[in-house]
Image (cartoon, rainbow, N blue to C red):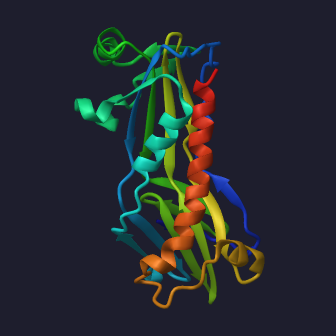
């Protein structure tokens, strides 16, 4: 986690994804009789990153709260996609197997792992693949840059001013196999203000209260964070589904 200098207390959210030029997404059609593979990796834990006035006040902590998100995502996909869906984790695949399966090169999409591609297309007869993962991310909240390990809560205490933010750090990608393409549905953390002493409306909407012990947040105290992140997660999965319902 990095702390940067700044004097303004105005909240600005800028995501960290680098604007790398990618080839255009070609026109494509997903038919009802096509097969779509998917793999979901959302750890059953909540990450908390805290930044204080000095680096000595910073800390990170993980909470093993059993909030079932993989099952929610899987049900949402099955309820809204008419194609045959294949859970690739049941076939022994890991989400890391598909990293950069298709990449942009010289303004066109190319296969980066031909052996895996042939297995997915020729053996499993897949038309597309959905990869949804939770993991590290970065974002800027003036006057800090936050590096987060995954979905959870970010808190700051700058000269006694406390703020809390719900952070959904879920990445959703779609690989299209015919025609070739990679769709980055979302790659950056989605941040929601849940407590700010100068903006009471956020606290009222989220229901979040300052924890009794900032270094040991209870599951009930964390529930408003989970609620806000689930709202973003639902929107992210709906957006993923929209790309495949065409």
In the rendered image, residue 160, in percent from the top left (x then y), is placed at: 62, 90
Which residue is more in the foreground, 214 or 88? 88
Q: Is residue 124 left or right of 139 when viewed as pictured?
A: left
In the rendered image, residue 193, in percent from the top left (x then y), is placed at: 66, 68
Q: In percent of the image, x 60 and y 13: which residue is there? A: 29
Q: In percent of the image, x 49 and y 53: which residue is there? A: 137
Q: Quadrant of residue 155?
A: bottom right
Q: Is residue 235 left or right of 197 when viewed as pictured?
A: left
Q: Is residue 101 above or below residue 115?
A: below
Q: In percent of the image, x 42 and y 44: which residue is there? A: 133
Residue 210 visible in rendering: yes
Q: Residue furthest left?
A: 92
In the rendered image, residue 79, in percent from the top left (x then y), is placed at: 52, 37
In the rendered image, residue 25, in percent from the top left (x then y), is placed at: 62, 19
Which residue is more in the foreground, 39 or 159? 39
Q: Is residue 143 above or below residue 186?
A: below
Q: Is residue 159 left or right of 78 when viewed as pictured?
A: right
Q: In percent of the image, x 60 and y 75: which residue is there? A: 164
């Amino acid at each position: 986690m990095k702390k940067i200098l700044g004097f303004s207390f105005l909240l600005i959210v800028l995501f960290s994804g680098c604007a790398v030029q990618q080839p255009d997404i070609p026109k494509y059609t997903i038919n009802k009789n096509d097969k779509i593979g998917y793999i979901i990796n959302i750890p059953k834990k909540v990450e908390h990153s805290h930044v204080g006035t000095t680096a000595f006040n910073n800390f990170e902590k993980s909470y093993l709260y059993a909030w079932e998100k993989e099952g929610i995502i899987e049900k949402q996909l099955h309820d809204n996609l008419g194609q045959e869906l294949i859970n690739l984790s049941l076939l022994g695949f890991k989400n890391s197997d598909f990293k950069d399966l298709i990449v942009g090169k010289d303004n066109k999409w190319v296969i980066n792992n031909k052996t895996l591609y042939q297995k997915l297309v020729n053996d499993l007869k897949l038309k597309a693949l959905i990869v949804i993962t939770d993991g590290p991310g970065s974002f800027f909240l003036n006057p800090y840059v936050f590096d987060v390990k995954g979905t959870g809560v970010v808190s700051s205490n700058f000269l006694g001013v406390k703020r809390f933010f719900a952070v959904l750090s879920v990445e959703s990608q779609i690989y299209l196999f015919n025609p070739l393409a990679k769709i980055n549905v979302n790659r950056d953390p989605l941040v929601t203000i849940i407590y700010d002493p100068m903006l009471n409306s956020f606290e009222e909407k989220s229901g979040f209260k300052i924890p009794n012990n900032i270094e040991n947040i209870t599951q009930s105290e964390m529930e408003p964070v989970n609620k806000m992140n689930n709202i973003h997660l639902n929107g992210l999965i709906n957006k993923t589904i929209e790309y495949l319902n065409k």
